[in-house]
């Protein structure tokens, strides 16, 4: 086991400098690693089995291959648009590899819900291939009230011409939580990504998004909001890598965080690496506190301090999560208990 | 109604004294105006009355109908009926105007032990008042004050004031940013609120607003204390003669 631990990414690596996986796993037994996970599909949909994903040669990829065994692989046939979502849930320890392929014109919503068990180590490697004109909605949530374990989820998303990808992520962190999304834009595609992390205690959450533009004409919007309190830590890393052929790329990235405690930490690294000359790329990053003047204004109108804080925080987070009412409800519950 | 006695307040942890033994009494049913030069302590007075952080009251008392206001949190003072029309109303992103107002109204009612207002009653009243103030329904659905012009924000303050029906109103430089038409609309609103059991304190740099809202008394605030008082005509004299005599 020591052998495995030594291969885990650690804070000496640039992409992991604020999320030291080796350090945190070092404190926990990793014997549970070899237990195969059960993946449950709540809504059984008759997809055909698909091919195995290409092997990944980095540490996390190797670990998931070594311990996760064969990938669960589905293909959504050309033009198929199932009404109910594909749900990946009740996943709380071990390694798993998943591959979902949407053939041309297909449309699918996937809801991924993750948790961790005490001292557990969950490692999810998920591959999405979205063909021409297909559309994928991906909704990722992590369990709100379980924090003892380590959770690493990495999605590899390949988008072909005219594909659409919408992603919404909400996490309340854990002992260690990292949600990484790596997107390859292989044609003119549309991407909307939003995310929020709400952290208390000593929880940790990392949202890392890497978007690789290989072809002209893509539009990407990526917005992440964070609220941290107590001694928690939020990490945002975002990168747009615009290759030379990817002219007329239109991409925006935002990360905004509010700190409710002096002991909480936020680390953010927005990056642009651009080789094409006719592009519009922007990034913005703010880390601040709730506006004291606005809070006084609300109190002057009769709204008690706690309620005023909760209202401002809810507006801050929910504005970025879109209109998913179930998520908004989770956010409200969290804020009401802590504001 | 409102009694301020020997009020002394400092900022910057006592380094600077802004109000220096201010005494003032506004009886129920009256409108009083406070005028004074820049830096006299006008805005500080409005914040001390409403309980904003950052101001330390080192001496004196403020009571509303005999209750000690200085001992209360800002939201408790609001529930007691103290309303401040802000010089610079704040933007509240993500909170629609009507949601904000209904939350505020019901929070005040709850603090007073009253039942919450029903949604239909609230909407009926909001629609009717918005019409009087020439506020478009669309504006009420937008986040409070976000993207509103200076004049729109001031009109929204009056709208909130009329919805909440406070017992004691402090208006801080309400006329700034208003053109003549908007000024008239605002003044009509304030005049409609004049009543035997309500007091109003208008803080202003210019006399203009007092042409529309005629006060029962006018006071000069300078160097943190009331230096002179008079009737409505006194405001006109101040406008022409300036404040030098009261420095």
Image (cartoon, coloured by chain):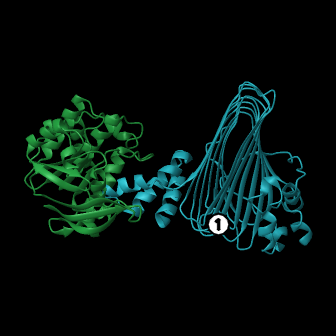
Chain colours: A cyan, B green
Q: Nearer the viewer, residue A235 or A322?
A: A235
Q: Residues within 10 Å of mark 1 (few under 14, many from 20)?
A: many
* Residue furthest to the right: A3
Nearer to me, A188 or B190 = B190
Q: For this rendering, which residue is in front, B75 or A73?
A: B75
Write the residue at 38% across / 44% down: B144
Q: Is residue B160 left or right of residue A108?
A: left
Residue A240 x/y as whole percent: 73, 39
| Residue A57: % across, % down | 90, 51
Q: On the image, numbered disc 1 is attached to which residue?
A: A203
> Along the horizontal axis of the image, is A181 left or right of A286?
right
Residue at 73% x, 24% y: name it. A278
Residue B115, can we see it?
no
Left or right side of A48 for B192: left
Residue A3 visible in image: yes
**Residue B235: quarter of image:** top left
Q: Is residue A181 above or below residue A165?
A: below
Instruction: Tell me the quarter of the picture where residue A108 sits.
Output: top right
- Element under disc 1: loop
Position of residue B29 measured from the top left corner of the image (x, y, whole percent): 9, 53
Count the marks.
1
Q: Residue at x 75, y 70 (%)?
A: A120
Which quadrant, please, contains the N terminus of chain B? bottom left
Circle 1 marks a residue in which chain? A
Percent position (x, y) of residue A236?
68, 52
Q: Say which residue appears at 83% left-offset and 68% top-offset.
A: A33
């Amino acid at each position: 086991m020591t052998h495995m631990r030594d291969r885990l990414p650690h804070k000496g690596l640039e992409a992991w400098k604020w999320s030291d996986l080796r350090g945190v796993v070092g404190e926990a037994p990793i014997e549970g690693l070899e237990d195969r996970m059960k993946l449950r599909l709540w809504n059984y949909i008759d997809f055909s089995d698909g091919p195995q994903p290409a092997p990944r040669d980095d540490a996390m990829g190797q670990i998931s291959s070594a311990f996760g065994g064969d990938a669960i692989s589905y293909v959504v046939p050309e033009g198929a648009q199932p009404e109910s979502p594909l749900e990946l849930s009740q996943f709380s320890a071990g390694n798993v590899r998943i591959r979902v392929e949407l053939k041309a014109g297909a449309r699918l919503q996937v809801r991924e819900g993750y948790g961790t068990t005490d001292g557990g180590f969950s490692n999810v490697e998920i591959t999405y291939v979205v063909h021409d004109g297909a559309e994928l909605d991906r909704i990722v949530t992590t369990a709100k009230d379980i924090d003892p374990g380590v959770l690493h989820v990495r999605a590899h998303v390949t988008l072909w011409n005219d594909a659409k990808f919408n992603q919404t992520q909400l996490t309340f962190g854990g002992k260690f939580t990292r949600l990484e999304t790596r997107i390859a834009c292989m044609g003119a595609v549309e991407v909307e990504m939003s995310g929020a992390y709400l952290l208390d205690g000593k929880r940790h959450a990392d949202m890392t998004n890497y978007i690789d533009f290989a072809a002209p004409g893509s539009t990407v919007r990526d917005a992440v909001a964070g609220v941290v309190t107590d001694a928690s830590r939020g990490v945002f890393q975002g990168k747009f890598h615009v290759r030379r052929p990817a002219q007329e790329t239109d991409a925006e990235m935002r990360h905004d965080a509010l700190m409710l405690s002096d002991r909480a930490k936020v680390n953010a690294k927005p990056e642009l690496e651009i080789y094409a000359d006719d592009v519009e790329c922007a990034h913005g990053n703010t880390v601040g506190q709730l506006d004291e003047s606005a809070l006084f204004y609300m109190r002057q109108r009769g709204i008690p301090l706690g309620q005023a804080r909760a209202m401002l925080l809810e507006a801050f987070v929910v504005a970025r999560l879109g209109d998913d009412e179930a998520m908004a409800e989770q956010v409200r519950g969290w804020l009401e208990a802590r504001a | 109604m409102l009694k301020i006695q020997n009020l002394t307040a400092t900022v910057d942890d006592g380094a600077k004294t802004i109000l220096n033994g201010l005494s003032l009494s506004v009886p129920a049913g009256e409108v009083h105006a406070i005028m004074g030069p820049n830096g006299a302590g006008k805005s500080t007075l409005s914040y001390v009355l409403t309980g904003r952080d950052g101001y330390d009251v080192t001496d004196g008392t403020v009571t509303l109908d005999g209750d000690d206001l200085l001992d209360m949190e800002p939201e408790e003072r609001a529930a007691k009926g103290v309303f401040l029309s802000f010089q610079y109303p704040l933007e509240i992103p993500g909170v629609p105007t009507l949601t904000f107002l209904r939350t505020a109204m019901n929070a005040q009612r709850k603090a007073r032990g009253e039942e919450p207002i029903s949604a239909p009653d609230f909407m009926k009243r909001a629609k009717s008042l918005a019409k009087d103030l020439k506020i478009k329904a669309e504006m009420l659905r937008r986040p409070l004050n976000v993207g509103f012009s200076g004049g729109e924000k001031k009109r929204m303050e009056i709208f909130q004031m009329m919805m909440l029906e406070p017992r004691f109103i402090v208006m801080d430089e309400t006329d700034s940013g208003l053109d003549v038409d908007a000024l008239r609309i605002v003044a009509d609103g304030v005049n409609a609120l004049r009543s035997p059991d309500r007091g109003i304190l208008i803080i202003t740099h210019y006399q203009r607003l007092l042409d529309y809202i005629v006060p029962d008394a006018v006071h000069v605030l300078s160097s943190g204390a009331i230096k002179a008082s008079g009737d409505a005509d006194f405001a006109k004299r101040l406008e022409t003669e300036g404040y030098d005599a009261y420095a």
